[in-house]
Image: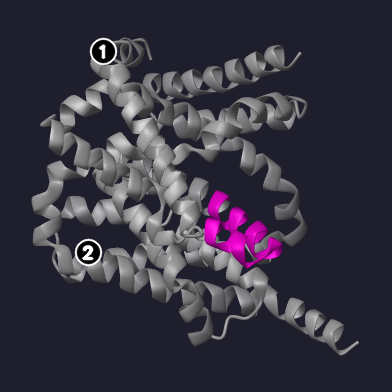
Amino acid sequence: MIDALANTFTLSGLFWVSVTLLCYFVSLKVNVYFSGHPALHPLVVTAALVALLLLLTQVNVPRYQQSVSFLHWLLGPVTVALAIPIFKQWQSLKKYGWRLVISIAIGGIIAPLTAWITLYILNTPIALQLTMLAKSITTPLAMEASAQIGGIAPLAAVFVIVTGIVGAVLSNTMFTLFNVISPVAQGIALGTVAHAVGTAKAIHMGEDVAAMATLGLCINGIFTAFVLPLIFSIMM
Amino acid sequence: MQVKSRMIGGVMILLSYYCGMFLSHQLSLPIPGPLLGLVILLAVLFFVPNLEKSTTLVALPFLKHMSVLFVPAVLGVSLYWNDIASNSVALFVAIVGTTALCLGLTGWFAGKLMGEGNVIRSDSKNRR
C-alpha cells in the first residue's frame, strides 16, 4: 500500500490517476447515453480512451501501470468488500435452498469446462487454457484465481469482460432458443454464466431476474475462486 | 457520527484484507489472500451483523465503480497481444460459442429445477 501510494503522489502518478478517472467519468456518460448497452461497458470505453492517450503521449504500458499502481492496489480491498453483497444475499439463498445451489453449480461447472475443452481441442497454449477456466466469475476473483493456477491475470480480466458482454447481448436469443421463460431461471443463467455484466442486464429485465442474477454471481464467484486453486494445488 | 462509522467500516475491510494476505502467505495456502480476506469479512459480518451498515457505507462507492480499477490490468494485455492474435479463432469459439450455449443450458436446467412453479403462478394470476 505504501509503495502504491508513493507512486501515486508523484507528478506522473497524480496526472495519470486523474486522467484515468476523467476517462471513466466520460465512459459513464457514454454508457448512459446509449442506455447502458453491454458492448459499451464503462471498462471497455475507459480502457480504449486511456490506451489512445498513452499512444498519443508515447507513454508505455508498464510505466502507466506504475503511475496508477494505487488504483490496481485498491482491487485487493474491493475484492474483500464483495463479502457485503454476499452477506446481503444470504437470506434469499436460504429461502430457495438446494435447488438454487444445484442450478448455479450446473452453470458454474459447464461454462468453464466447455470453454476449456474448446481450447484444449483447438490446441492453444496451456496458459490460455488455464486462464479461460476463470472466465465466468467476476473480474477481481477471476484475476486472483487465474494467477493462482498459472493463468495470466490481465488476460483473465479481458476474457471475463468479453464473456459478460457476449452473455448480455445474446441472452434474449438464447433464452428464446432454449425456451427459458421463468424470470428466476433467466436470472440464474445470467448471473452464473455472465457475472456482473449479465447482472447489469438482468436489472433491466425485472426485479426477480436481478435478485437471482446477483445470487448466481456471488455464489459462483466465491465457489469457483475457491475450488479452482484447490483442485490445482492437489493435482500439482 | 457518519465519519466514525465510515472509519470503522474502512478499518474492518483493510484489517480483513491484511489478515487474509498474511495468512495466505504465511501458511502458503493455495487460496489467494484477498479471497481469504473476503471470507474473514463475511465471518465477521455473521458474528457482528451491526457492522454491515458501516462497511456498506465505505464499500458501496468502490463496489459501484469497481470497473475503473481494472483499467491498469486490462491495458496490460497489450503485452500478450501475440498470444491472443495467434489463437484468435479458438478464443472466439471458446468465449462466444460456449458462453451462449451455457447461458441457454443453465437457464433450461434452472427452469426445470425451480422455475416451472413460478410460470404457472404468473399464468393463473393473468387468468384472474
Which dot, 2 or 1, sits closer to the camera? 1
Label drawn at residue A100:
none
Residue type (three-letter) at the residue carrying disc 1: Leu
Residue at coordinates 29% horizontally, 43% vertically from top-left? Answer: A47
Residue at coordinates 48% horizontally, 77% vertically from top-left? Answer: B104
Circles 2 and 1 on the same chain: no
Residue A92 higher or lower than B49, as above or below: below
Local crowd size for mark 1, using a 10 Å CA cut-off: few (<14), some (14–19), many (≥20): few
Who is closer to the viewer here, A198 or A137? A198
Residue at coordinates 56% horizontally, 32% vertically from top-left? Answer: B61
Percent coordinates x, y for residue A41 in the rendering: 41, 53
Q: Which residues are magenta?
A: A199-218
Percent coordinates x, y for residue A29 in the rendering: 46, 46
Q: Secondary structure at mark 1?
A: helix
Label drawn at residue A11:
1
Who is closer to the viewer here, A233 or A63? A63
Label drawn at residue B91:
2
Q: Visible in this render: residue A185?
A: yes
Residue type (three-letter) at the residue carrying disc 2: Leu
Residue at coordinates 53% horizontally, 62% vertically from top-left? Answer: A201
Percent coordinates x, y for residue A191 in the rendering: 54, 59
Q: Chain of mark 2?
A: B
Q: Secondary structure at mark 2?
A: helix
Q: CA distance from mark 2 to mark 1?
A: 39 Å
Q: Chain of mark 1?
A: A
Local crowd size for mark 2, using a 10 Å CA cut-off: few (<14), some (14–19), many (≥20): many
Residue A177 higher or lower than B70, as above or below: below
Screen quadrant of the C terminus of chain A: top left
